[in-house]
Image (cartoon, rainbow, N blue to C red):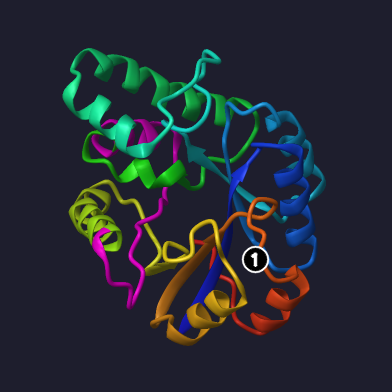
Amino acid sequence: MRSFILTADDFGRSPEVNAAIERWHKAGALQRAGLMINERSVDEAREISRRNPSLQVGLHLTLCDGLASDGSQLPPTPFQAGMLYAFNPKRRAWLREEIESQFARFVAMGFPPHYWDGHTHLHLHPLVLSLTLPIAAKYGFRHTRLVREPGLPGLLPWIFSMLSKRALPLLKQNDIGAADAVFGLRKSGRMDAVEFERALRDAPDGVTEIYFHPGAESLLPKPEWVAEKFAGKPPAFQ
């Protein structure tokens, strides 16, 4: 049996993204959204979640291309961030504190601790993951995202597949769940109708997550079209 989760990333990043996420959810084409807890439109995102209680909000852990908890700019790319965190031991204490701060603020804002993932999937960085797991367990989070997209060749998909494979036993040891397959990497930032149809066609048995970026992707079809395509398919909340 196949079931689907449709997830929006970057909730809280801008008023435009927030408005698009609310529109997609109300159209029945979106079940959950990952919140960038330190971005400037996070309070508006919280209000949207309050008036849409069926929208499940998770923590979109942000360690690059965004704001840190003290308002400073994080490294602009995942490559720069990954190198900095991996090879600069002086940054590791800061990194642990930043991860803790984002989880703590998420819970303090009243969001249930259900799932987290990572902006640019940096949560799968081995050091980030090792620091995050005890913090996530402390606050009661039980699910995350492994980036395993069926039928996707290339270096970047292989890297994320290997990172996900390495992460899986650690998640099992900590009783953390994840979807069986994820679509969105091949067309990240460029999701379109063809990619939604591919996911619907090629998803394996089990839970499949489809992630995209409402308000920031110009090729997205109308949410009503997506809702119709997935009508009758059982939503899966991990």
Task: Place residue 97 in its image quadrant.
Answer: top left
Q: Mark 1 packing: few (<14 Cα in 10 Å), some, or many (20+)?
A: few
Task: Place residue 99 in its image quadrant.
Answer: top left
**What segment is highlighted magenta in the picture?**
129-155
Residue occupying image coordinates x 41% and y 51%: 144
Residue occupying image coordinates x 48% and y 30%: 103
Judge from the rendering whether residue 191 lies leftward or rightward of residue 215; answer left or right.
Answer: left
As rendered, which of 21 and 2 lies closer to the eye?
21
From this viewpoint, is residue 134 visible?
Answer: no
- Percent position of residue 128, x then y: 29, 34
- Percent position of residue 33, x then y: 61, 50
Tell me the quadrant of the picture where the N terminus can be found: bottom left
As rendered, which of 109 and 221 lies closer to the eye?
221
The residue carrying mark 1 is: 219
Whether 191 is drawn above or below 39: the answer is below
Query: Which structural element holds mark 1?
Result: loop
- Amino acid type assigned to the residue bearing label 1 in the image: Leu
Residue occupying image coordinates x 79% and y 57%: 23
From this viewpoint, is residue 199 visible?
Answer: yes
How many numbered marks does the figure carry?
1
Whether 125 is drawn above or below 224: the answer is above
Asked if the magenta segment contains residue 174, the reply would be no
Judge from the rendering whether residue 232 lies leftward or rightward of residue 5; answer left or right.
Answer: right
